[in-house]
Amino acid sequence: MTARSQGKSARRLILWDVDGTLVSCGPAGREALESGARLAAGLAALPHLPMGGKTDPQIAGEMLLGAGVAPADLDTLVPVALAEAKRALAGWRERMGREGRVHPGVRHLLDELAGSDGVRQTLLTGNVAVNAAVKVGAFGLEGYFDLPVGAYGDDNAQRELLVPIALDRVRELRGETYQPEQVWVIGDTARDLSCARAAGVRCLLVGTGGDGFGAVRGLGADAVLANLADTSVGAGHPARVGLGRGQRIPRLEGARGRLRSPGWLTRTRSLSQTSGKSIAGFPRLTVEVVVTDERGVLLTRRAIEPCRGMWHVPGGTVRFGERLADAVEQGGPARVGHRGAWRAGCWATSSIRATTRRRLGQPGRASSSW
């Protein structure tokens, strides 16, 4: 579910780190903080310091101290440095998009979780809130996150205190409470793990940060991946983190009476038997609906990959256990608020090629049989 549609059904809270986990922004982030610190204190040069896992206020303070600024002046100079860094980074959004990158598997995983009931995603990062939004926005990722319930470096300079801030916000703003086992911090440094452990929640570490996989593989996180495209660890993969209960995914059984899928769909891979879920990397049944009125055929523009920015007819994924008639209604007319004529088609696809195509019913109505 997107930030706009995440609702009270949420039962997994995913707290994403930004730099090194979701994206790498090139040198712009460091340059913004260094520029802010120099301008705030009138400095010609600053020491080059490691930043991984630290909060922006912590980094700015360490830079100023390393340059010889008196500790008593930090309370005044750090806010000025962060304000200057915000201004610089806001002007470098396009630059970050050119020089940076989204890490492997991130877009696909975010797409899977965004389309799944029961999962709320937000950010937990050392970036100040404005800069965090700019960074994910530079790569078109901001729509995946419920940003107001996140926790950021300007909430507290100590990263270990950020998880309780996010839990308080999601309770106050969304009316949701979570047990520790329902909350996952996803990050790329030892500080992300310390942050999770301080709050008693789970942690997934990825090896896409500046120090690589070797720096996180032996830290004792609940799950460790080389990158988010790595599905080799089964239940540890984030698709299972968000959609399952941290157990190996069983075969699809309970849904077959309601969704009579082709035999290969249940023979070739293990699928979740939990109703209403979509699992990354498995064959996917989708519906697309042609919606018409006197003006012509309705098209929508995709906001996410694949085919981001391209025009297509409205539709969506059929969740395991969902009746096809319900999927057609929710994927097309209900999604766009249309009350007129429409025609439905149904596709079974894999990530490699279209596998089967059948037409459902007659114009204006759909059948739940395959």
Image (cartoon, grey):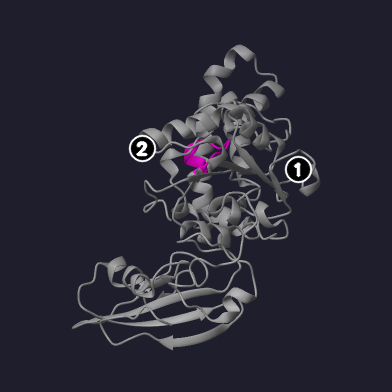
In the rendered view, tell whether residue 163 sits above or below residue 307. above
Q: For the residue marked with disc 1, what is the amino acid?
A: Val
For image coordinates 77% across by 49% down, the residue present is: 213
Q: Which residues are magenta?
A: 123-132
> Split into 4 quadrants, where in the image is the C terminus?
bottom left
Q: If you read the primary sequence from the N terminus, does the residue marked by circle 2 or circle 1 appear first?
A: 2
Task: Check disc 1 and report the residue beneath it.
Answer: 216
Instruction: Locate residue 61: give its quadrant.
Output: top right
Q: Residue furthest top?
A: 72
For image coordinates 47% across by 58% down, the residue present is: 116
Is 137 in front, or is 43?
A: 137
Is 44 in front, or is 340?
A: 340
Pointer 2 and pointer 1: residues touching (CB < 8 Å)? no
List x then y, in percent, for residue 175. Answer: 36, 37
For image coordinates 64% across by 71% down, the residue present is: 269
Q: For the residue marked with disc 2, what is the amino acid?
A: Gly
Is 123 in front, or is 224?
A: 224
List x then y, in percent, for residue 81. Answer: 55, 29
Q: CA distance from mark 2 to mark 1?
A: 34 Å
Visible residue check, residue 203? yes
List x then y, in percent, for residue 352. Answer: 61, 79
Q: Is residue 239 magenta?
A: no
Residue 175: which disc? 2
Q: Residue furthest left?
A: 294
